[in-house]
Image: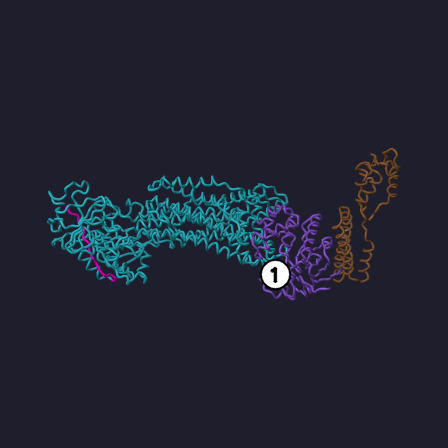
Amino acid sequence: MRRIADLALGVRLSVGGGRSGWTRLALIAVGVGLGVAMLLIAASVPTVLDARDARADARSVAFEQELTPGEPTVLTQEVRSMFRDDPVVGLQLQPEDDDAPLPPGVTQQLAPGEVVVSPALAELLASDDGAALQGRWGDQVVGTIGDEGLAGPEELRFYLGTDQLTTNSVTVDRVQSFGGAETPDEGLDAILLLLVLVGMVVLLLPVAIFISTAVRFGSEHRDRRLAAVRLVGADVAMTRRIAAGETLAGAVGGLAVGTLLFLSIGRVAGYAVPAELSFYPADLRPVPVLAALTVVLVPVTTVLVTLSALKQVLVEPLGVVRRSSEHHRRFWWRLLVPVAGLALLTPLIGGFDESLGSQAMVVAGLILVLAGMALILPWLIQATVHRLHGGGVAWDLAVRRLQLDSGTAVRAVSGIAVSVAGLIALQGLVGAIGVVTAESQADTTTFQASVLDIDPDADSAATWAHELSRAEGVAGVGTLSSVWVQAAPGTGRSSGDETAGDEIGVDAGTCEVLAQEARLDSCDDGDVFVVAPDGATAPEAGSTYLLDTGREEQTRWTLPASAQVVEPAQGGLGAMGGMPARILVTPGALDGIDVRPESVIAYVSLDPAVPDALEHLRTAAAQVDPAAYANPIEQERVASVLGGVRQVLLVGTVALLVLIGASMLVNVIEQLRERRQLLAVLVAFGTRRQTLGGSVLFQVAIPVVLGLALAVLTGSVLALALQAAVEAPLTFDWQGVGLTSGAAALVVLLTTTGSLPLLWRLTRPGNLRSE
Amino acid sequence: MPTEPLLTAEDLHLSFGPTTALESASVEVHAGEVLALMGPSGSGKSTLLHCLAGILTPDSGRVTYAGRDLTALHDNERSALRRSEFGFVFQFGQLVPELTCVENVALPLRLGGASRRAALRSAEAWLERLEVSDVAGKRPGQASGGQGQRVAVARALVTRPKVVFADEPTGALDSLNGERVMQLFVAAARDTGAAVVLVTHEPRVAAYSDHEAVVRDGRVRAREYVR
Amino acid sequence: MLGLLEGGPRHGYDLKRSYDERFGQDRPLAYGQVYSTLARLLKNGLVEVESEPGAGPERKKYAITDAGVSDVTGWLDRPEKPEPYLQSTLYTKVVLALLTGHDANDVLDTQRSAHLRLMRDLTRRKNDGDLADQLICDHALFHLEADLRWLELTAARLQQLAAQVRA
C-alpha cells in the first residue's frame, strides 16, 4: 500500500509541478509516444503483409488446376505492364460459360474489350498525367475492382475481357475458381527480406534509445524536487518509487499519445508508401501479442531507465549529488560486442538465404554491431575530449563541459549514430543491389526499349514493326526473331556437347538489332555470327541445321565458314556466363528462308523529345497484344522497388533525426536554464554572446561529429558485409553517407539555433539578480 | 573632492514592471577608492551596482565612466568595456564549474584576446597572490567556499581593471573566511589602483571601505567622506 | 593572571611580559599590579611560591595550585553576564527622535557613519597588528556591528510603525 501511495505521490508531483512539471510530462509523453507509435507500426507490419497476401492469394490463378467436368470455366492470361516505375498487373479473362467464375472484387462477366480497373488505375486513367495510358486496354471501362480484390488501395490492377485466348499458349490457364495458387511470395526474395530485416533493426534500435532518452527529459529538475521530498522525510527507496511514479505518468501519457499518433498515421500511411506496398488503413492493426508487449514493456522500460539513471545521482535532503559519472571507461569489453556481431555476420558472406537461421543471424549480428557501436561511442567521446586542447574560449568551454559530463551528450548522439550507421549500411546494400539488377549496362544508343512477344505468329515480326512504328514517340523499330534449331542428323558437332544436345538458338535480325546481342566490329547484310559466352562451345562452321518454316516442312541451313565468333553484348544475358552459344544471322544470310519464330523481340528507338514515349509504346504494344511485355532496355525494375524502400528509410531516418534533434534541444535548454546565473555572470564579465553561442554549438557538434564518424565507419563496414552477403559488388555509398551526414549536421545547426533565443533571453541584463 | 570622479551615476530611474528599483539614485566613485553600497535587502543596491557596471541600462539618468556615457553605448561596446576596464565578484555561483580554477581566472584575459599561455601564466601569479595556488588545477567544485571566492577575486583583478564591482563577496562565507577574502581583496585592489564598488549589508565588511553610501528605497541617502 | 600560570610556574617578571604580549598596548600592566595580584592570589591559596634560594621577588617562581586550576576552569566556563542595554544612550536617542518627530533614519545614518569610522580604524589596526590586536579589535568590531544592526532593525520597525500610524 505504501508503495502504491509513493507511486501516486510521484504521479501527483509530476502533474502538480506547475508549468515546468507539465512541460516535462509533455516532453516525456511526446517522446515516448513517438517511440510507441513506431513500435505499433512495426507490430502491425505482419498484419498488413498477411492481409495483402490473403487478398493476393484469393485472386491468384492456379497453374494447371484440376477441373471438374461440367463446372463453368474461364480462360485467363496474366498481363504485366508498367506505368513509369509502377507495375500495372492484370488478367485477361475469357469466360467459357455464362456463369464462369469471377475474380474477387469483380461483379460482372466481361465482354471482349470491356475492362474493370482498380480505383487507383481509374484515377490515373482519368488524369492528364495518365494520358499515355489511355486506351492501353481499350476504352470500355465498365467498372472498378472492389477492395477485396486488391492488395492495397494504391494498387494498379485491371481485368480485361477478351476472346483471343487459346490454351495453346503456355501462358493461358483454364480455371474453375480463383485462388489457391502455390505462388511463391512475390517480392520478398532473399535480398528484399534482408532489406526488411535490416530496416527494422535500423529503425527500431534508435527508437529504443530515443525512448530511454525521453524519460530523462528534465530529470535535473525532477532530482531537485526529489531532494525537497527527502528533506521532509522520504527515504531513498521512497524517492525511487516517487520517481518511478512520475516516469510512469509520462509513459502512460506516452502510450496514449503513441496510440493517437498510430491511429492518425494509419489513416495516411497506406497511401504514402510506394503503390506496391500500399495497404488499407483497416489492415494496419498491431499483432495483439506485439501490441500487448509494447503496452507492457514501454512503461516497464521507462521505469527501469529512470531507476538506473537515479543510481547515478545521490538524492540527499539538501540537494543532488552527481556520482562521478566520469569513471574511466574501459575499451576492450566494449569492443567485444561489435566484434561478436561481425563474427555472426561473417558466415553469411556469399551465403545469405531465406532460412530462419540466416535471418536470426543477420538480425542478431546487426543488433550486436549497432549496439556495440552505441557502447563504444561513450568511450570514444570521453577519450577524445580528454585529448582535446587549445582553441578559442568557446571551444574550451565546450570541451571542458564535455570532459566533465559527456554522458548526456552521448545518450542523445548514440541515437543519431545508430540510425546513421544503419542507414549507411542499408543504403550501401540498396545501392549495391541496384547495381546488380540494373547491371544491364546494355547499349541504349540505338534502341531504348523492347517489346517481347513469346507467342508470335509467322508474320508477328512484320506486324510489330508496322504497328509500333506508328506509336507516338517511336523513332524506329527493329525486330529480332528467335528460334531453336536441331542439328541435321549426321552432320555438325565434332564433339558431343553433353547437355545442350544438338539444339542451338538462332536469332535473326538486321545488323542494328544484332548489335544489341553481341559486340560486332563490322556487320553487313548476309553476315553470320556465332556468340560464344565464356565456357560455351562454339558450333563449327559447316554444321547443318533444320529450320522450321511453320509450313509443316523443314529447311536445311548450313553455318557458313564466314561466320565470325564474337563476344556477347555487355549487359545482356549472354554476358553473365554459363549460357550456351547462339547463332546470329542477318536476313541476307537466310537465303530467303521464312523462319517461323518462337519469340520475337521488337527493339524500339524512342524519341527523347516526346514525354512518356515509353508509355505510348507500351500502350501501342498492348493494343496489338496485351500479353506482350514492353520494357526499357535498361533494367530498372528491382532498383525502383529498392528506391521505394530507400525512400521509406530516408523518411524514417529524417523523422528519427528530428526526434533526436528535439531531444538534444531539450537537453541544451535544460542545461542553459540550470546555468542561468553563471551565464549572467559571464555576460557581466563582458563575454560576447557569440562566444556563448559558439560554445553551445561546439558542445552539440563535437559529440555529433564523433558519433557520425563512428557511424560512417560502422555503417560502411556493415554495408560491405551485407553487400558481400548478397554477392553484390562492393561499393561505398558516398551519396548516402553525404546525405545522412548532412542531415545530421543540419540537426546540430537547428538544435543550436533553436537554443539561441533562450540563450539570448537568459543573458539579457537583469538575470543576474538571484531569484 | 580633489579629482574628477571616475564613475558617476546621475539621477537614475529604473523599474522592473510595477516595482521601482531605482528612483533618482546618484553616486560617485573616485579612482582607487573603496566605496561600500549599503542598505536593507531590496533597497536597490545591487541594481545600482549593475547600472554602474553597464550590465543594466536605467530607464532614465546617466552613468558616466571616464567621460563616456555608458547608457548611450551599444551593448557590444559595453561588453568590451566590462571585459577590459571592469572586474566582478559575486556572492556565489560565478565560477564556470567545468573549468579548473586557474582557467577560470584566465578566462577574462582570454575573452580579451590574450593567448592561452600568457593568460594562464598571469592567472597563476594571481592565484599565488591570493594564496590559493593549491587549488589552481582543481575544479571550483573541489575547492572550499573561501578558496572559491579568492579565485573569483583573482579573476576580477586579473585584467587589472579600473573598477571592481563586488556584490556581497563574502555573503556565503563564515566570518573568518570572509575576513581573509576581504583583506586580500582590498589589499590587492589598492595595489593595482582599482576602485572597488562593494555591495554589502554587513558593517564589518563595509569597514574595509573608504566611504559608504546608503541606498534606501531606490535612492542614495548618504555618502560620507572621511579622508 | 591565573590563566597565564596554567602553562607552568613562572617568575613575576615573565608574567608581566607575557601579559603585555597577549593583551597589548591598550592595558599595559605595571609591575606593582602584577605583584599585588599575585599576593592576593597567594592569600586565597590559588597560587603557591616555589622559592629559589637567595632570590628577591623578581626571582620568586609562582605556580598555580589545584584550587587555582579549578578556579580558572570555572572562570572560563562561566558566561559573562549579557548586557542587554549596552547602548542605552543610543536607545534613548532613537526613541526621542521618534517622539520629537525626527526621522529615525537620520539618526541611524549619522550613527552608522560614526560607527563605521571607528570600525575602519579598528579594521586597519587589526590588519596591521598581531593576534592579540586582532582578538581585541574583533571584539570591538562585533559589538559595534551589533549596535548598528540593532539600529537598522529599530529604524525599520519604527518606519513600519509610522506607516501603520499614518494608515
Q: Nearer the viewer, residue A257 or B222?
A: B222
Q: Which residues are magenta?
A: A472-486
Is B160 on the left or on the right of A216, as rendered?
right
Chain letter for the brown colouring in the rendering? C
Q: Nearer the viewer, residue C113 or A288?
A: C113
User: Which image quadrant for residue B194?
Assistant: bottom right
Residue B192, how many percent across, how many down?
A: 67, 56
Q: Nearer the viewer, residue A257 or B69?
A: B69
- Residue A43 visible in image: no
Residue C90, how many percent across, how many down?
A: 81, 56
Element assignment for label 1: helix
Rendered residue at 82%/43% (across/down): C17
The residue indicated by pointer 1 is B81
Q: Nearer the viewer, residue C133 or A359?
A: C133
- Residue A727 visible in image: yes
> Label 1 marks which chain's residue?
B
Residue extending furthest top? C53
Image quadrant for the N terminus of chain A? top right
Q: How would you classify the magenta stretch by its main secondary structure?
A: strand
Residue B176, how many percent across, how many down?
A: 71, 47
| Display coloring | by chain
Magenta span includes A481: yes
Q: Residues within 10 Å of mark 1 (few under 14, many from 20)?
A: some
Residue B139, how many percent across, how many down?
A: 59, 47
Rendered residue at 66%/48% (across/down): B131
Q: Colour of chain B?
A: purple
Is A294 on the left or on the right of A541, as rendered?
right
Q: Colour of chain A?
A: cyan
Image quadrant for the C terminus of chain A? bottom right
- Callout 1, which amino acid? Leu
Magenta span includes A598: no
